[in-house]
Amino acid sequence: MAMRAALRRVSVNFFHNPPQIPQVAQIPASRLLWRVDGPRTYRSTASRLSAALKFTDKHEWVRVEGGIGTVGISNFAQEALGDVVYCGLPEVGQQLEQTEEFGALESVKAASELYSPLTGEVTEINTELAENPGLVNKACYEEGWLIKMTIGKPGELDSLMDEAAYEKFVKSLE
């Protein structure tokens, strides 16, 4: 209350009509506390999301659901690139072979080619990246995906790394 009165006295010197300072909302303490109904376990977001991901040695990932593969770059790759400012992606309908270059990402630090993890046809591109390429940095396993494609040769999935193998691969690079 004293602070409010002091602000009104000071503001009279600057304003003909002093601003009204709203009352502070009273929030019950019970609304500010987290509820813990049992022991909590914490897993990284990447671990939860990448349970079904397969990785290439070029740092692309693919998640296959219903015969369609969603493709993006790994967290390691996006951190190495820095702030992505442009995404060059293929046209829908383009046929890709495994390891074929299909686009590029440009950042403030570097440019990097993108390679297809599998053989198939591009069925969708992430149009959000044209307006907001930074999604690759903010959520590379979620909203920052690059393309969706059919899986032409399902056996190629066996040649890709799971999360544990990819983490070991990344550590070998350091």
Image (cartoon, rainbow, N blue to C red):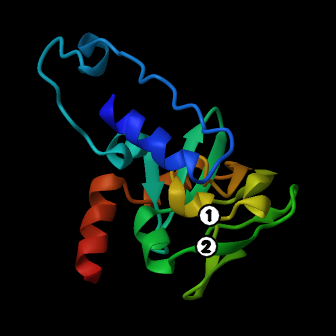
Does residue 126 show up?
no
Residue that appears at 61% across and 73% down: 84
According to the picture, the residue beneath numbered tag 1 turns out to be: 134
Q: Secondary structure at mark 1?
A: loop
In the image: residue 90, left or right of residue 42:
right
Estimate the x, y position of residue 142 in percent, counting from the top left: 55, 46
Give the residue type at disc 1: Gly
Estimate the x, y position of residue 20 in percent, counting from the top left: 58, 31
Check whether the beta carbons of the residues at disc 2 and disc 1 lie within 8 A of each other.
yes
Estimate the x, y position of residue 13 in percent, counting from the top left: 56, 52
Give the number of the disc on residue 84.
2
- Distance from label 2 to label 1 (Cα)? 5 Å
Q: Count all numbered tags in the image, as a single digit.
A: 2
The front one of 14 and 153 is 14
Estimate the x, y position of residue 103 in percent, counting from the top left: 72, 74
N-terminal-most mark, 2 or 1: 2
